[in-house]
Amino acid sequence: MILRRGTAPLAVAARKTTPYRAATARERYPRLGCSKLPAYKLDGMPETEALASWIVANRIECVPADVRHEARRAIVNYLGCALGGSHDEAVDLAIRAFGPYSGPATASVLGRGERLDPLHASLMNGIISHVYDFDDTTPKNYMHPTSPVASALFAYASANRVGGRDFMEAFITGFEAEMRIGNAVYPAHYDAGWHITGTAGVFGAAAAIGRLLGLSVPQMVWNIGLAATQAAGIREMFGSMAKSFHPGRAAQNGYASALLAQVGFTAGAHGIEGARGFAAVQAAQYDLAKITDGLGSEWELRANTYKPFPCGIVNHPTIDGAIQLHDEFHPAPGSIRAVRLRVAPLVLDLCNQTNIIKGLQGKFSVYHGAAVGLVRGKAGIREYTDEAVNDPAIKRVRELATAVGDPSIMEDQAFVEIELANGEKRSRFVEKSLGNIHRPLSDRQLEEKFRDQAVVAVPVAQVEKLIGLSWRIDELPDVNELIAGACGR
């Protein structure tokens, strides 16, 4: 059946019930080089089949050098976040709950000493890498794209020999697949309350593992369908441990989809574009063209960003401005009489939590972000602990803060004003926040972020080696060389 692009499913034409058999990319285009692969949608293929064909056909040689470097940056950032979050209480609880039900312990959990089966290791890696909300984010759809894909890949590579080139080829392919599906349903999907990291992330993990398993195009179509039927995660969980469960389950379920497809476990052929497929069911409006337009020539990794602060990304401009005021004027917390914020309206949709008592809640409170920036002049992991949100000075300033959504302010901007007890006012307008696509963290800053987090899980002497291996991951004969050094104390 053929579903047209639009805001709702249209009438579909019945097809004869013949066995599904799509030619592989190699069969369709046996002698074409990377630069000559066709625009898949032009030959009338449904989006699921077109994407599956590209996933099977894509090669790392087809990927521009700057995109490959951005993939390395994503891995450096991911591994640092995974090591930093590896000993959080949420991870301890998840391993306690699921550990007894693990299969053969063949896979490593990043930053930990435990070994589980690869599916459970994928789940734990996803929780670990996202538990502090410090992993990468793409502002165009607010997905945390690396966590679902890399969490599954590192679990697979710890149980199977995988060369760095194949690992990175699978990572880039999975990243591209999930982002394009996410773009197709954003913003209606997100506005409805779905957490796009969980829902779209499962496709990325499925595509990446499917590549390593060598799935054919028909198998990849089933793989996508199996991922679609497991797409889950709701925004009501923000501010709780359950939010980090989303990329973990996406990694686990995507991995499982690929395993099922490999042995011939079938799924509907139109998991994305079908009348009751992913897009129609989970978004009131969608644009399927975003899945295939520019596929193989335009790369979503170029839109990736890396957080300087471990909280909701829309809080970053406010934090940036508050830190600037702290560093320039050094206001004593007790002298602050009012904090006034003007922010993009989306900030109040995502990060409007008040009356908070838990560190996880602070990650989704623009008021807490302003308070820690003004009081401590920083917003690191320690500023989002239970201790920090209950610190009397921070709590006082947080409760003085008010925020107004201003449509004239972009999502990477903020206006921060403080009024002091003597009536003086100080303000700062942030035009482009740190970590934004226009003010990205440098490679060196990513390394510093890695160091700050990794010491939680591995000896200091091991950190520099891990950084070096992460930058060279695509050159490693076996990715286990990196994983072994990151397996925890």
Image: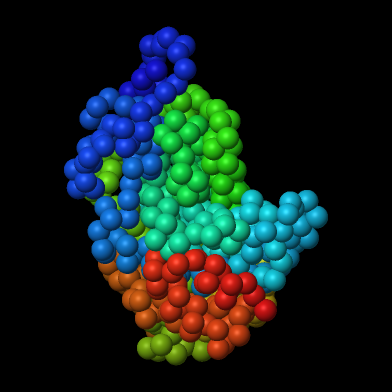
Estimate the x, y position of residue 203 in percent, counting from the top left: 48, 43
Q: Can residue 4 be seen here? A: yes
Q: Quadrant of the C terminus?
A: bottom right
Indicate left or right for 349 with 102 as reference: left
Please say if 108 is above or below 8.
below
Estimate the x, y position of residue 283 in percent, counting from the top left: 45, 34
Q: Nearer the viewer, residue 379 or 133?
A: 133
Q: Nearer the viewer, residue 184 or 73?
A: 73
Q: Can residue 137 be seen here? A: no
Q: Nearer the viewer, residue 12 or 375?
A: 12
Residue beneath the point at 37% across and 81% down:
444
Estimate the x, y position of residue 396 in percent, counting from the top left: 60, 77
Residue beneath the point at 36% across and 20% down:
2
- Location of residue 382 by image quarter: bottom right
Q: Nearer the viewer, residue 435 or 409?
A: 435
Estimate the x, y position of residue 108 in percent, counting from the top left: 64, 64
- Location of residue 120 by image quarter: bottom right
Residue lying at the far right of the rendered structure: 100
Please say if 315 is above or below 177.
below
Q: Quadrant of the N terminus?
A: top left
Indicate left or right for 439 with 252 as reference: left
